[in-house]
């Protein structure tokens, strides 16, 4: 709730800055503890509140002539992946450590916003999971390194893998 005045200020500065032509919106899709401006908890199990909020924001940016891209969700390890993995490599057999989760879990969790924004934003809905997931799994690493630096932030290596998303 304390962040909302800052957010409004940032959004207004972007809306009113004529030099800003392109806006890329990223959010923490997996967070469930959302509140409204009055501090009341929002139950957003079906993503309707986030969809509504993103639609309002995108519409206001479009009205000011901004080209808007929205980053879709990614599957995150939700544990200190990089430090755990490095210890596993150093002290244990890495073969016993799971470097992914089933893609079907990710798709079922995010099906509503994925379908909605894919339909309504088209190529302006950037899908990082298409890079991090293969046909069966959403991966947290490959043989070259970890995609994550902690529980939910992409590492430098993971960020470099996202470069193809920004060829617009």
Image (cartoon, grey):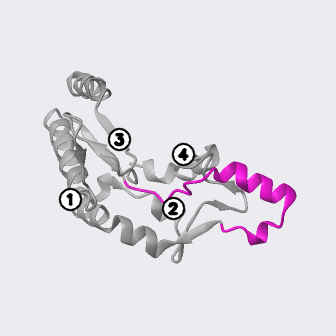
Residue 166, horizontal then vertical, whole percent: 44, 48
Measure the alpha-carbon separation of dots 2 and 3: 18 Å
Marks 2 and 3, the one that precedes in the sequence: 3
Marks 2 and 4, the one that precedes in the sequence: 2
Residue carrying label 2 = 131
Residue carrying label 4 = 153
Please tell me whether mark 2 or mark 4 is closer to you in this view. Answer: 4
Please tell me whether mark 4 or mark 3 is closer to you in this view. Answer: 4
Residue 122, horizontal then vertical, whole percent: 27, 59
Q: Image check: 3 left or right of 48?
A: right
Task: Say whether marks 1 and 4 touch (CB < 8 Å).
Answer: no
Residue depicted at 71% across the width and 67% down the height: 97
Q: For this rendering, which residue is in front, 162 or 41?
A: 41
Q: Image check: 99 left or right of 90?
A: left
Pointer 1 local density, CA inside 10 Å: few below 14, some 14–19, many at least 20:
few
Residue depicted at 31% across the width and 26% down the height: 2
Measure the alpha-carbon separation of dots 4 and 3: 17 Å
Residue carrying label 3 = 24
Q: Which residues are magenta?
A: 72-98
Measure the alpha-carbon separation of dots 2 and 4: 15 Å
């Amino acid at each position: 709730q304390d962040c909302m005045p800052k957010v409004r200020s940032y959004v207004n500065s972007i809306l009113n800055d004529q030099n800003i032509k392109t806006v890329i919106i990223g959010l923490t899709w997996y967070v469930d503890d959302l509140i409204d401006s009055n501090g009341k908890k929002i139950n957003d199990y079906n993503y309707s509140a986030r969809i509504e909020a993103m639609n309002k924001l995108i519409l206001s940016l479009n009205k000011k002539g901004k080209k808007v891209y929205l980053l879709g969700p990614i599957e995150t390890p939700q544990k200190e992946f990089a430090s755990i993995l490095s210890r596993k490599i150093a002290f244990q057999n890495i073969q016993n450590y799971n470097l992914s989760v089933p893609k079907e879990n990710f798709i079922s969790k995010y099906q509503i916003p994925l379908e909605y924004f894919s339909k309504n934003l088209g190529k302006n809905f950037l899908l990082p999971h298409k890079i991090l997931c293969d046909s069966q799994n959403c991966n947290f690493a490959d043989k070259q390194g970890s995609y994550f630096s902690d529980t939910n932030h992409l590492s430098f290596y993971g960020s470099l893998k996202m470069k193809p998303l920004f060829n617009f």
